[in-house]
Amino acid sequence: MSISLSSLVSSSQLTLGTAVSLSGTAVGFTGIPAGVKEIQMILQGASVTGTDDLIIQLGSGSYTTTGYNSYTIALQNTSPTVSGVTSTTGFNIPSGSATSSIYGIAKFVNITGNIWVGSISVGGIYTTQFSFLVNGSISLSGVLDRIRITVSGSNTFDAGAVNISYQ
């Protein structure tokens, strides 16, 4: 099958949100307009008080906390070590330790209907340099109108900022 590029509708201009300091156990962005086909979450120095993982969740009316098909690959510069983890509760980013700072971009694209495919590339430094690659998908119950970053346990955010952009 071949699709003519002239038949494709051009996308709207990129909209950048307002950066917010990370604090508490979750930071979310709501009110994302209907018709958005791509959304990005930008992490700048995200850090938690312990070793809880960071979890990005999308939603329609409320945050979707189950049904994700997500796989994370961890790459470290020591040895080199490669390890992986699957998640059904969100797009999982290991934090490593209380002294970690995570930087990167999580990108989600609407493939059809209410199905979103995510691709995340983040990295940082704690006792070693590391990178995490996260890929997966989620089928929402309705039109995407929110995205958040939260923690997997009782830790709280103690540094960093987050923002979104969409089109």
Image: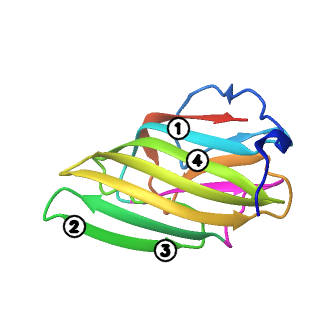
Q: CA separation, marks 3 and 4?
A: 18 Å
Residue closest to the eye, 130 or 47: 130
Instruction: Give whichever of discs 3 and 4 has the lower sequence position.
Output: 3
* Label placed on residue 42: 1
Q: Nearer the viewer, mark 3 or mark 4?
A: 4
Residues at discs 1 and 3 in contact (Cβ within 8 Å) = no
Residues at discs 4 and 2 in contact (Cβ within 8 Å) = no
- The amino acid type found where label 1 is placed reads Ile
Q: CA separation, marks 2 and 1?
A: 26 Å
Residue closest to the eye, 5 or 137: 5
- Left or right of 82, for residue 7: right
Residue 103, position as x, y percentages in the image: 40, 40
- Image: magenta residue range: 52-67
| Tally of numbered tags | 4
Residue 11, position as x, y percentages in the image: 77, 35
Q: CA separation, marks 1 and 3?
A: 22 Å
Q: Which residue is mark 4?
A: 107
- Left or right of 31, for residue 123: left
Q: Which residue is mark 2?
A: 81
Q: Quadrant of residue 15?
A: top right
Q: Which residue is mark 3?
A: 86
Instruction: Give whichever of discs 1 and 4 has the lower sequence position.
Output: 1
Q: CA separation, marks 2 and 3?
A: 17 Å
The question of residue 62 being in magenta is answered with yes
Give the residue at x 78% y 56%: 62
